[in-house]
Image (spheres, rainbow, N blue to C red):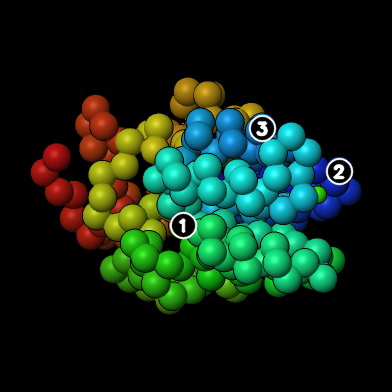
């Protein structure tokens, strides 16, 4: 899952970038409101962490601009402790949740997980496709009860596939949701990581779950559907 953080304070921006990356998310950080808007319009993010007090364009203006343009990406606002007005205005402007600074990192992660659970994505912290099971809170994956160890990027890729079961996903769609701008132009990164996942998720099982849809991309399902 790919997250945009819009935060101008270097210490917090670095803390958020590092923490979310370690949790397996693809992260882009924008340092002011206008840059944040550029990023949000250029890529399809799964969630946006948005500071309210930003140079060049404040967070609430950025949020209204996104909603005016029909962009429904879940937004978590970061606000100051005494800024009740910001929170009220933010929720009214279309924010999905807020977190008061300073915050504990596990709470930020839990709130992001909650935002990512909302429809149309599959509900709940445990995802299932056939005998494959992923607990997104504990970050554990099992197939037929057997634990599968994944790197953070492999986990992120599998999570994206499991949140869109049976859908045919193009390489571009997958890349945009699993890698940030630093990586996703590397053309074969998706194929390489699908190969890693296949070895861990499908190897040794009778029924493959990861299917190549020729000329299009990939699909996670019990049986390959006719494309
Ligand atoms: Ca700020």
Q: Is residue 81 left or right of residue 170?
A: right
Q: Residue at x 66, y 33 (%)?
A: 34
In the image, residue 153 above or below residue 150: above
Residue depicted at 57% across the width and 49% down the height: 63
Look at 62% across and 46% down and name the residue there.
61
- What number is the disc on residue 10? 2
Position in image of residue 192 (x %, y %) = 48, 34
- Identify the mark nearer the N-term, 2 or 3: 2
Q: Is residue 138 above or below residue 166?
A: below
Q: Nearer the viewer, residue 102 or 90?
A: 90
Q: Is residue 79 left or right of residue 151?
A: right
Helix, strand, or loop for circle 1?
helix
The crowding category of the residue bearing disc 3, from other C-alpha atoms within 10 Å (few below 14, some 14 to 19, many at least 20), is some
Which mark, by number, is residue 35?
Answer: 3
Seen in the picture, residue 96 relative to 192 is either above or below; the reply is below
* Of pointers 3 and 1, the one earlier in the residue sequence: 3
- Residue 88, how many percent across, how many down? 63, 68
């Amino acid at each position: 899952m790919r997250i945009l953080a819009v935060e101008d304070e270097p210490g917090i921006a670095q803390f958020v970038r590092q923490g979310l990356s370690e949790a397996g998310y693809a992260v882009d950080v924008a340092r002011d409101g206008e840059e944040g808007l550029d990023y949000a319009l250029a890529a399809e993010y799964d969630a946006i962490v948005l500071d309210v007090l930003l140079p060049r364009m404040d967070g609430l203006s950025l949020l209204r601009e996104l909603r005016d343009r029909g962009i429904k990406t879940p937004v978590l606002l970061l606000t100051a402790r005494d800024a009740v007005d910001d929170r009220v205005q933010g929720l009214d402007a279309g924010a999905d949740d807020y977190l008061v600074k300073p915050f504990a990192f596990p709470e930020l992660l839990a709130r992001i997980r909650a935002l990512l659970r909302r429809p149309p994505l599959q509900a709940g912290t445990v995802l299932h496709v056939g005998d494959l099971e992923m607990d997104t809170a504990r970050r554990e994956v099992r197939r037929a009860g057997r634990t599968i160890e994944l790197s953070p990027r492999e986990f992120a890729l599998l999570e994206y596939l499991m949140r869109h079961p049976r859908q045919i996903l193009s390489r571009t769609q997958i890349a945009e949701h699993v890698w940030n701008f630093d990586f996703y132009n590397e053309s074969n990164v998706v194929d390489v990581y699908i190969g890693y996942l296949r070895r861990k998720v499908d190897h040794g099982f009778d029924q493959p779950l990861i299917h190549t849809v020729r000329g299009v991309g990939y699909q996670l399902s019990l049986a390959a559907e006719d494309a």
